[in-house]
Image (tube, helix red, strand yellow):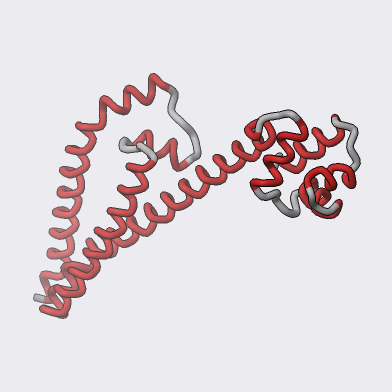
């Protein structure tokens, strides 16, 4: 975090010792030391007193921390998206591969189990879509860039926005085709057991 360095920089520029700054802010010298060494973080009242004492805006004082916080939020969003994306992929694969065998061997209970797997898969798909919507990513190129922590430039972003309607139609058709092919292959494999 940058706030500790900012406090130390402005304290030094004002030619104040930690003890003198502590008196102005109504805290102990140890508290100032903890702030400067990033062991603790000042409360809002202390931040306001610091910005007033140093004659700077609150934004200037915590500017570095805002950048760091934005990076941490973005990193956590990417991790969350990747987590749901991986869970959805595994769940979808399990649902596709196990649907026919479960229905054939366990009959009614197999169908119920397949329905439960499908429900879990759809829940995870909704989580992935929610992440995509909150980060305004829809096309494959946007998803890959987001997963890698990159942003598309304005030209690339506009090109991807133009592709969005077509990619959704191809995605639906592609998923239906893959499901059909896998189901037929599984049915062909299980035909001797029927």
Quadrant of residue 182 within the rendered picture: bottom left
Q: How many marks?
A: 0
Q: Is residue 157 left or right of residue 52?
A: left
- The residue under the point 20% across, 50% down is 178
Picture coordinates of residue 69, whole percent (x, y) = 58, 43
Instruction: From the viewer's side, name the closer residue of 155 and 110.
Output: 155
Instruction: Please state the horizontal and vertical placement of residue 111, each as a whole percent of the image.
Output: 14, 73
Residue 119 spot, x, y in % from top left: 22, 64
* Residue 5, x across and y down, in percent: 77, 39
The answer to which of 87 and 72 lies nearer the viewer is 72
Which part of the image, by quadrant, shows the C terminus?
Answer: bottom left
Q: Nearer the viewer, residue 155 or 183?
A: 155
When asked about the image quadrant of residue 3, the answer is top right
Q: Residue at x 61, y 40 (%)?
A: 68
| Residue at the spot 31% in from the left edge and 37% down from the top edge | 138
Residue 190, compared with residue 56, is above or below; it is below
Residue occupying the far top of the picture: 155
The reply, left or right, for residue 187 in relation to residue 51 is: left
């Amino acid at each position: 975090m940058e706030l500790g360095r900012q406090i130390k920089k402005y304290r030094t520029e004002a030619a104040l010792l930690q003890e003198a700054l502590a008196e102005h802010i109504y805290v102990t010298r140890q508290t100032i030391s903890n702030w400067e060494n990033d062991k603790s973080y000042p409360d809002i009242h202390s931040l306001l007193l610091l910005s007033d004492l140093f004659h700077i805006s609150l934004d200037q004082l915590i500017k570095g921390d805002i950048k760091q916080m934005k990076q941490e939020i973005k990193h956590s969003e990417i991790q969350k998206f990747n987590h749901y994306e991986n869970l959805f992929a595994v769940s979808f694969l399990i649902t596709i591969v196990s649907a026919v065998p479960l229905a054939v061997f366990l009959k009614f209970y197999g169908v119920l189990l397949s329905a439960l797997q499908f429900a879990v898969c759809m829940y995870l798909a909704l989580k992935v879509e929610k992440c995509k919507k909150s980060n305004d990513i829809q096309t494959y190129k946007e998803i890959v860039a987001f997963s890698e922590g990159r942003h598309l430039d304005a030209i690339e972003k506009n090109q991807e926005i133009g592709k969005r309607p077509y990619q959704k139609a191809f995605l639906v058709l592609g998923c239906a085709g893959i499901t059909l092919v896998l189901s037929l292959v599984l049915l062909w494999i299980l035909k001797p057991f029927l």
